[in-house]
Structure formats: structure tokens, C-alpha cells
Image (spheres, grey):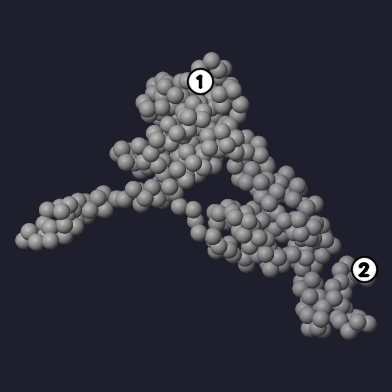
Amino acid sequence: MTVRKTPGGRWRGVLKVGREQVASKTFDTRAQAVAWVSRERAAVAGGVDPRAGKATVRALLPQWLETREASVAVTTYNTDRYMVDAVPAWLLARSVGSLTDREVQRSLVEYARAGHAQSSVTRFRASLSSFFGWCVRERLIASNPVASTRVPRQATPRVEMRPLAEAELESVAAAVEQYDETLSRLVLVAGWTGLRWSELRAIRVRSFVEVPLPLLIVERAAPEGVEVKTTKSGRSRRVPIADRVLPLVRGFAAGKSADDLLFTTARGYQLHAGAFMRATSWKSTGKGRRIHDLRHTAACLWLARGVDPGTAKAWMGHSSIATTNLYLHHLGTAADRAALDRLNGPGCAGGAHGELEDGSQ
């Protein structure tokens, strides 16, 4: 008999292949036990052995990564590898055959509540789906439990960009200079080149060229605490260096070999965000901005000076023009400016003197 009642009053479903018992599970009702046996029989008929599904997620992830390394792009593989470190311990300990969409959804919610951006949660879900899809192809499980899950809605408001105006950038650099002249020059370089902090940490002297024009060739990123990797987009890009900061970049390169880090502290050490913020009293000198707002500052400086959005997109390394357009939204469009000029023009209630056409107030 494939379903029998236990001494405790529950119902145990038993799956046999031939005379061998290969799996069993206990349920509160007989109907649940019968349904489970039916599903497991169908899985066996389709070529999935329930015994294979007893392997834990922790044991199978290295095997999956090995196949991924040989079949996907380096950036995709790196994303998957970092995802492995984010899988919660309770999920790692579970057997792949025992996991349902409910458990996977729970892991997505936990990841989102840890403060990750929705785009990161989306990538986390994509990697999990790839892993369980591999388990299906390997006949370890019958279906992918990620398929019916959804990316949780972002619980915390998105942090808005707060770029500095050009005069503000100069003011911040001057304030930082009171603490550290080298890091003051770094603030200006970051505010004019738009390099991410991880890219500033990774770029080498050989990536600074002046022929045919001054450029930084951005190919790598060095997030703190992990290995050097490709840029966020997975592609290299060229960022022209404005005259305002060209002498500063030359100063950083002076006396260094081609393989040396280009941007370092005054003592030649690699940059670290925590040390930078302490050394510069960034909470006060940074006017309430994040270090990443220096990247936003560069994009706004370029666009405000007439660089077309397509070029700014390439310099920033954005994968979509929609991302670059966020800066246009922040600055205001040409239509916004034309409408404001009209609003403030003579004869309008919003004019400089608040006068109406008849001269009254």
C-alpha cells in the first residue's frame, strides 16, 4: 500500500521503484499523501529520481558554477558567483527536491529587506532560476521552483541623486583640501570623469593616455572586499578628461610605472571609502552627499555644458539611454527652460517684479 496511516494519526506516502522504497513523506491528510505519491510517480516516469533530489543546494552550487564558467560570459559568471555568497544558510542546507516556490520567494524577500536595490534582487532571482533550471536539466528535480516567484517590490524609497553644481564641487574640494590635498584632487577628478569608486580604485597608469586626446580607458572595477572584476556593464569605455582636471590626473600619474594604480592616497595606498571619509571629514565637507554623487555630478556637468545624451551615455557606461535621461530629468529639459523663461518674461504674473500687464501688483 503506497499510503498508510501512522500511529500518530498522520498519513505517510511511500514511493517505490520496483520493490525498492525510494522516498516517503508524512502529511496531515490522506488526500495530501495520495497527491504527493501521484506527483512523485509522474516524476519518476519522466526520468527524475527523487533520490537525486536529496542533494543539498550547498553541495550542488559548485557543480553548477563549473558548468556556468564554460558556457556564459565572464560578467554573467561573476554575477552568479557573487550570488552564491548571498544565498541564506537555511536555503543552502535544504535539499533541492524539498524546495518549493514558497521557500524561494522567502529568500527573495529576505534579500530585498537586506537593503539591496530592486535591480540586484532581479539579478539574484535570475541566478537562482538558472541554478534550479540546471537541476531540472540534470534530472535532479522535476520543475523549477523559481518560475512562479516574483521580485518583491522595493520596500525602501529609492535614494535620489544629489549631484553638486560646478561651484559646489569646487567648494567641496576646497573644504577637503584643508584635510588632505591629494584627496581634494581626487574629488575633482571623480566629479569631472564620472568614474565609480570601484573604478577609481582599479584603474592603472597605463589606462591614462593623452594621444590623440586625453582619455581614461576604464576596463576594470575593484569593489572593496571582492576580487577585481570587469566594469558594471561588462564593457570597457573611454572617458575624455576635461582641462579642469587634466593637470590633476597627470599629477597622480607622475613617477609611477604603467602597472601602478593611478589614483592612490598621498602615501601611495589603494583607496578605501571608509578611510577616505574619515580623512576628509566627509560628513561635513561633502555637503551631505554620498561619494557616488560625484559620479552623478559629472553626468550633470557634461549635459549642462551641452554634451549630447548619447555621448554622455557612452562616457558613463550606461547600458540604456533611459538611465542617462534620468540626469536630463534632474536638470530639466529644454521645454522646461523655455516655459520658465516665458513664465518670468515681461507681462507675466511670475515675472521678476511680479507686475501684471497693466502695471498693477
Question: How many other residues sit within 10 Å of disc 2, few (<14), some (14-19) or many (≥20)?
Answer: few
Question: Of the residues tagged 1 and 2, which is closer to the observer?
Answer: 1
Vertical position of residue 352 compared to residue 6: above or below: above
Query: On the image, numbered disc 2 is attached to which residue?
Result: 20
Q: Quadrant of the N terminus?
A: bottom right
The circle drawn on residue 253 is 1
Q: CA distance from mark 1 to mark 2?
A: 72 Å
The residue depicted at 70 percent of the width and 54 percent of the height is 87
Q: Is residue 213 above or below residue 302?
A: above
Q: Position of residue 264 (x, y in %)?
A: 56, 27
Residue 329 seen in this snapshot: yes
Which amino acid type is shown beneath numbered disc 2?
Glu
Q: Residue furthest top?
A: 255
Local SS, label 2 = strand
- Residue at x-position 40% and y-position 42%: 164
Q: Is residue 27 above or below residue 85?
A: below
Q: Secondary structure at mark 1?
A: helix
Q: Nearer the viewer, residue 58 or 17?
A: 58
Residue 311 shows in the view:
no
Q: Quadrant of the C terminus?
A: bottom left
Q: For residue 131, which quarter of the picture?
A: bottom right
Is 151 positioned to the left or the right of 46 in the image? left
